């Protein structure tokens, strides 16, 4: 199950670990991604904190924590291949993994259906 | 807000999956389906077609045209030979840049001038104000379509359009020709650093010509996004960024081309001779992929020393680059370490030399 924020982050669970990335829609809107600033491992993020930056040829965009948690891994592949986010958004193009997620915060996010509706209305 | 204008190719862009954006009052393709990085690489390796119909075209005719234009434009016009294109600047009385433009000498007494889209009306007003009554000025922008064919394989494409290789113009020269039954002007110029041509045809034939070029082997469309990264890698100035009403051509690094020491007089020349440059355009190579954007502050030893005019990831360089103005009094020589503000972070870099991309084929013998 995937959850989406109004700022177009995407978060999905694998057991107790959450993967955070940007949505397929956000990746398409940004176009070819050329740089990703990754968060530091061990950093405790609070909902809404800036966790990184995603840059495309034309624009830079902050990535916000869609839920609170502790950064336990970052996707090192994005350092040399930031375009992986365009190729495989919401999957191999994940930015970081979070532990100690606050599940109540996830419930505040949109599910796939609600996000699709949100995009249509925007 | 004024309604956006569309080029004759607008429908073709949509069919090709273009993402259209407003640019200088025009609805223009920023990229097509494959994206900016693919279009950039295709231009460097093969050949791309750009719709540049938004740009303006003027014609100046009359016995005194060369003399008159020599007094209006910052680079000499009088000594420009027929058949040659020359990059030039339209300045105001303050010596700052109203526009950068390309002047084609068509005959002894006739010039074709290509200007930026956003500055077209202001340019026309400036020419009309200063040209003597013996010269006629015509704005032919609405009747003229412009396409850029750019890339190492562009000669092969031009040959398929009916031109013979041995008749093709040399770098910064032009010829008249025909594609089928359509008259055109073809110049060996461009804005990418690659071997290429700019081609002018009547606007009512634009769609036909576009489709004929698109049908040629290896040709793919490229949008304004790739045009910008390609020109930035070459360090070519873009009006509104490196050049504007706060900047002189001397500050932008074109001082030597103006032949000020010869004593020639043109609009703005007195200020250029009497006032020292307030800033100097430099090339900055950043240490990684992260780009600095226009307006970012440049710091040298922690002090505010300048401002970025253009910045992006350079796809052919694998790292970010920027052009920036360094204020006078600060070091601007190659090798100077700088740091650029990027939001809360800062990006380190070093002043380098242009072009950033050194393997361009633009001047290649054909």
Image: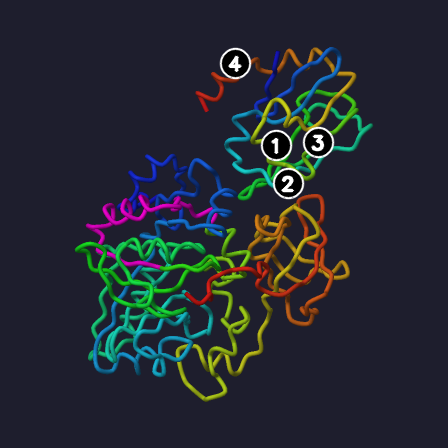
Q: Are marks 1 and 4 on the same chain?
A: yes
Q: Report if the CB atoms under discs 2 and 3 are less than 8 Å apart.
A: no
**Disc 2 secondary structure class:** strand
**For the residue carrying disc 1, how many other residues have a C-alpha within 10 Å: few (<14), some (14-19), or many (20+)?**
some
Q: Secondary structure at mark 4?
A: helix
Residue at x 50% of width, y 65% of height: B246
From mark 2 to mark 1, how far is it between C-alphas? 11 Å
How many C-alpha atoms fall within 10 Å of the one at disc 3: few (<14), some, or many (≥20)?
many
Question: Residue B44: x percent and y percent?
Answer: 49, 52
Disc nearest the viewer among 1 and 4: 1
The residue that label 2 is drawn on is A35
Camera-nearest residue between B79 and B176: B176
Please name the residue that numbered disc 1 is placed on: A84
Chain of the residue on which disc 1 is drawn = A
A118 sits to left or right of B298 = left
Q: Which residue is mark 3?
A: A51
Task: List x then y, in percent, for residue B217.
Answer: 36, 46
Q: CA distance from mark 2 to mark 3?
A: 14 Å
Q: CA distance from mark 2 to mark 4?
A: 29 Å
Query: Upstream in the sequence, badge 1 or badge 4?
Result: 1
Tell me if residue B45 comes above or below residue B16 in the rendering.
below
Q: Earlier in the sequence, mark 2 or mark 1?
A: 2
Q: Mark 2 vs mark 1: same chain?
A: yes
Query: Which chain does the numbered disc 2 sit on?
Result: A
The magenta segment: B198-226
Quarter occupied by residue B328: bottom right
Q: CA distance from mark 3 to mark 1?
A: 18 Å
Let me know if residue B138 is in the magenta part. Answer: no
Relative side of A72 to B28, left or right: right
In this rendering, the label closer to the viewer, 2 or 4: 2
**Residue reaching furthest left?**
B181
Q: Secondary structure at mark 3?
A: strand
């Amino acid at each position: 199950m995937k959850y989406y924020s109004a700022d177009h982050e995407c978060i999905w669970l694998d057991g107790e670990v959450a993967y955070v990335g940007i949505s397929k829609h956000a990746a398409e809107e940004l176009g070819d991604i050329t740089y990703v600033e990754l968060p530091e491992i061990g950093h405790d993020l609070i909902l809404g904190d800036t966790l990184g930056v995603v840059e495309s040829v034309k624009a830079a965009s902050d990535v916000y924590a869609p839920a609170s948690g502790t950064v336990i891994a970052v996707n090192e592949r994005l350092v040399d291949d930031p375009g992986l986010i365009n190729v495989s958004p919401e999957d191999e193009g994940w930015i970081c993994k979070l532990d100690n997620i606050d599940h109540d915060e996830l419930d505040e996010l949109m599910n796939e259906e609600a996000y699709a509706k949100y995009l249509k209305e925007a | 807000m004024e309604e956006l204008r569309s080029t004759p190719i607008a429908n073709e862009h949509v069919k090709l999956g273009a993402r259209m954006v407003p640019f200088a009052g025009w609805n223009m393709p920023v990229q097509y389906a494959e994206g900016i990085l693919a279009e950039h690489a295709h231009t460097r390796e093969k050949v791309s077609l750009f719709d540049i119909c938004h740009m303006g075209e003027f014609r100046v005719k009359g016995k005194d045209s060369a003399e008159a234009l020599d007094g209006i434009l910052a680079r000499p016009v009088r000594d420009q030979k027929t058949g040659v294109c020359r990059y030039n600047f339209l300045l105001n009385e303050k010596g700052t840049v109203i526009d950068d433009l390309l002047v084609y000498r068509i005959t002894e007494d006739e010039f074709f001038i290509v200007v930026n889209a956003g500055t077209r009306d202001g340019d026309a007003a400036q020419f009309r104000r200063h040209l003597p009554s013996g010269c006629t000025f015509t704005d032919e922008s609405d009747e003229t379509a412009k396409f850029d064919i750019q890339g190492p394989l562009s000669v092969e494409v031009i040959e398929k359009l009916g031109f013979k290789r041995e008749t093709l113009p040399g770098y910064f020269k032009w010829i008249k020709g025909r594609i089928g039954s359509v008259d055109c002007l073809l110049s060996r110029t461009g804005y990418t650093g690659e071997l290429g041509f700019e081609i002018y045809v009547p606007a009512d034939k634009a769609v036909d010509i576009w489709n004929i070029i698109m049908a040629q082997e290896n040709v793919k469309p490229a949008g304004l996004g790739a045009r910008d990264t390609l020109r930035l890698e070459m360090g070519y100035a873009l009006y509104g960024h490196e050049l504007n009403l706060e900047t002189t051509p001397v500050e932008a690094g074109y001082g030597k081309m103006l032949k000020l020491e010869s004593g020639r007089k043109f609009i703005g020349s007195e200020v250029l001779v009497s006032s020292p440059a307030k800033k100097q355009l430099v090339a900055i190579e950043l240490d990684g992929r992260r780009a600095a954007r226009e307006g970012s502050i440049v710091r040298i030893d922690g002090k505010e020393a300048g401002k970025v005019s253009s910045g992006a990831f350079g796809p052919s360089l694998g790292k970010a680059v920027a052009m920036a103005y360094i204020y006078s009094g600060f070091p601007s020589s190659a090798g100077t370490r700088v740091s650029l503000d990027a939001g809360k972070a800062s990006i380190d870099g070093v002043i380098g030399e242009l072009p950033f991309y050194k393997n361009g084929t633009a001047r290649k013998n054909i």
